[in-house]
Structure formats: C-alpha cells, structure tokens
Amino acid sequence: MRSSLPLRALPLRALPLLALTSLALTALPATNAAAGSIGDQRTVTQPTLPGTCTTLSATLVAPSSRTFTSSQESAPPDTSRIQSALNSCAGTGKAVVLAASGSDNAFLSAPLTIGSDVYLVVDTGVTLFASRVASEYQASSGATCGTISSSTSSGCNAFITVTGSSSGIEGTQSSSGSQGSIDGRGDLDVYGTSSSWWANAQTAKNDGKSQVNPRLIQASGANNFTVYDIDLVDSAKEHLYYKSGSGFTVWGLRIKTVDTALNTDGIDIDSSTDATVEDSYIMDGDDCVAMQTNASADEYLTVTGNHCYGTHGISIGSETTYGVSSVYVDQNWIQGTDSNGTESGSANGIRIKSYSKVGGTVSNVEYADTCMEQLKYPIEINPYYSSSTGSNYPYFKSVTIYEAKETSSVSSAKSAVEGYSSTYPLGLTLEDVSLDSNSYTAEYANVSYYNSTIVPSGTGVTSTSISGSGSVPSCSFAGYPSL
C-alpha cells in the first residue's frame, strides 16, 4: 500500500488484503472530484444491491472439470428460465438472483439478454457457466462463430448482451470476500471440437487471421449500467465491453484469466461518457482497461484504485478517431506478471497508442499516483502502433503523468515518449516520476518535467524544467485475491 495516500483514497477491498483490518470499511466516494473538470462528472459511490424480483435455485453441481454431461452441454438447461425471469422482471429495477440450493451451486446457459431496469445477481458460491456451443452465439452477420476467419468482423454475440438502461450485473460478497462468478470457459474445447476458444485465437494470430470468439459481456447503448462485486473468469475474448453509453460504473469487479489468453481485455470503454472503474482486480491477456472510440468520442472517464496483473496496461487507444478527452487515471497498481508469475507478452503500464488509420486527438488526460513493477514498457506513448496508414493522424496533447513509480523492471525495459510528427507533437508533463529503467525512445514531443528520472531528448523533442511540489509515491503490491 502506498504510504503517501490519504485514507479517503484507499480502495475498499484492498484494505483486508493488506491487513488494515482496524479501519472501518464505509462506502467512499470515487475520487473523480479531485480531478476537477476531468474524469467522470457524476458523483460516484459504492453501489448497493437492488431488491429481489425473483430467485432461481441452482439444480447443478459445479464439476471440478468445469464441464457437464454431453446432454447438458449440447442443450444448456438453464437458458430459458433465466431469460424468462429477466424478461419478466424488466422494468422493475429489481434483480433476478441466481442462488445455491443445498449442494447445487451451478447454472449452465446459452447466451442471455438483459433489458431495461433489471439486474442479474449471482450469489456468493454460485457460478454461471457459459455455453461452449459455438452456434448458440452466432450473430446475424459476420463470420461463423467458433472459426478462424480472414475477416475482422466478429460473427459472435456475447454471452450476456445488455440492451437496456438502468440495469446491472452484480454479485453478493461473503464475509471472507468470495463473490458470485461468471465463467466463460475460454480455456475449454468448443463443444464438438478438439480446440478451445483460446487455441483458436492463437492459431488465428499465427496464420495472420482473426479469431471469431464471443465476448463475455457486451453493453451497447445501455445508459446507467452497473457491474458490481462479481467475478469474471476465463472469457473467450474481451470480458466486459461497454459501447455508446453514458453512466457506466464498475466497482468490486474481479477478472481472472491468464495473460497468455489473446485478446481477453479486462474492460473496454468505447465511444462513451461518464464512466468510472474503481476498486477492481483485473488479470487478463490484453489491456487491463482500454478506452477507445469506434463510433463517437470518449470523454469524462475515471479509472481509480484498481490492481492490474499481467495485462497490457491501462490504455487509451488504439482507435482514437473521434477523440478521447477528460480522462483521469488515478491511484492504480500495475504489475507485469499474472498470478502464476508469467510475464505479460506486452507488459505496459501507462499507455497511449494509435496510428494514422484510426488516430485522432487525445487531450486533457492525467495519469496520477501510479505504482508499477516488473514491466517492459513503464510509459508507452506510441502514435505508430500499427503499420497501417491513413489520414487520421494521432495527436496526443495535454497529457500529464505525475507521481508515478516503476520498480523491478524486466531486462531491457524501455519507455516511449513519441508524437506523430512536428505538426502533431506530443504534449506531455512529467512530474514526480521515478523509473528504475530510464531507457527510452523519443521524438516530436514538447515535455515539461519536474523531479523526473526520465528527461527525454531526440528529434523534435523539447524538454523544459518546471517547478513543482509533490513527491514520488511509496509503493507496495498486493497479490491477486483468492476467488
């Protein structure tokens, strides 16, 4: 735990892990107010569970293999009753609760849809398992789900698709910290084949093609959507994808997927406004949190008090065409290894990435009070992320990194501080930044610095000393919690 942080800023679930049991665990507001005009403009506090509309009792026991009988796998038995309950409870503002019944603690379902004013709540000790039958995810257009394709368009619907506003996916938490779980089973063979979703992704990468795998949760146009106190495990692709909405709250989420599982981003925020990701533990095979634009601008986003393990960092991009602005990334811990000790294949910390085919303006961004360890790329600001070209030039300006510390960097660790060109230079402030590996590449950047171990120079780079009064944070790291 960083000793320099005031008590008000400590993430709630980090406290028991770090033996600070004498402190009262009261609901604390998100720290976006400290950022002023940037970050989520809502006042965000810890969510509470909704009332219950109906409770469904489990009729299956979760098997140690995480696979069920052939008849159950081929026709998941819980699909219709969960979907019927969600439909019946829509508009109530209450929850469909998945509960244990004696030793029965599992639900097995094909893809589900959540409408407006309804919540899906998974009780502690209960797991909702996603179907392994690829055809059940098939979208009306795109490639065949479960295959490898030369097309970049996905043909899979998500396991859970959220279409309505004022809804959520939540869990209950026990006194020991365990939560309800949703298991995507991306590591297991697609039903009727001898290859897993993850193996398909690796084969696609090796062949220069695209995986056609389903996301675990996707919310599109779903304003005021909440994800709270739930575990997401082993998604076939991205775990939680939020697009074209306003009012997105993630709190107490735990994602656990090995960092070798390709394209299994933790949380993606796309073309949305007023979002907060707080107090969450995220381990996956791609970005910890990614902010991108594929339809409209991203703005007023807060990412605070989170732990990332073995990911590709807390990232902006690569798609920034419509603009990313007013982003506050505060009080996060980023570790380069997952819980198995495996180093991420792209161990980034603070990351902004794009390229001229999908670039745009990134402005008014602050990465504050960031603790990093065992990274290859502590700071990675890269406007040449792909060789694909176009006329959407990346323009990263008014980016601030302050109170950042990296320790135990891996061999040949190197940062990148790069603007696209002299016409589109990077505008960067480095204040109270301490890296234990200060190798870097730099070009086309206007840098202001105070108390920074990295002072960039290079083609088109101007570095100017400024005054300041802060300090480098003191960092220690918590292990990934037991699920």
Image (tube, grey):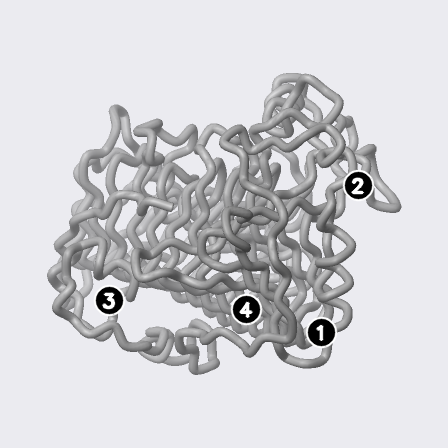
Of marks 3 and 1, the one in the foreground:
1
Marks 2 and 1, Cα distance to the nearest angstrom?
24 Å
The residue identified by callout 4 is 226
The residue identified by callout 2 is 136
The residue identified by callout 1 is 89
Where, by quadrant of the figure, is residue 245 drawn? bottom right
Depth check, front residue: 200 or 458: 200
Kindly identify the amino acid type of the residue bearing the numbered disc 1: Cys
Left or right: where does residue 215 sit relative to residue 333?
A: right
Q: What percent of the width, then of the height, locates residue 93?
A: 63, 79
Depth check, front residue: 388 or 224: 224
Q: What percent of the width, then of the height, locates residue 144?
A: 82, 33
Q: Earlier in the sequence, mark 1 or mark 4?
A: 1
How packed is label 1: few (under 14 Cα within 10 Å), some, or many (20 or more)?
Answer: many
| CB under 8 Å between discs 2 and 1 | no
Marks 3 and 2, Cα distance to the nearest angstrom?
42 Å
Q: Earlier in the sequence, mark 2 or mark 1?
A: 1
Of marks 1 and 4, the one in the foreground:
1
Kindly identify the amino acid type of the residue bearing the numbered disc 4: Thr
How packed is label 2: few (under 14 Cα within 10 Å), some, or many (20 or more)?
Answer: some
- What SS does tag 3 mark? loop
Left or right: where does residue 23 sit relative to residue 191?
A: left
Kindly identify the amino acid type of the residue bearing the numbered disc 2: Glu
Where, by quadrant of the figure, is residue 303 drawn? bottom left
Q: What percent of the width, then of the height, locates residue 117?
A: 67, 76
Q: Earlier in the sequence, mark 4 or mark 2?
A: 2
- What SS does tag 2 mark? helix
Quadrant location, the N terminus:
bottom left
Where, by quadrant of the figure, is residue 474 drawn? bottom left
Q: Is residue 223 visible?
A: no
- What SS does tag 4 mark? strand
How packed is label 4: few (under 14 Cα within 10 Å), some, or many (20 or more)?
Answer: many
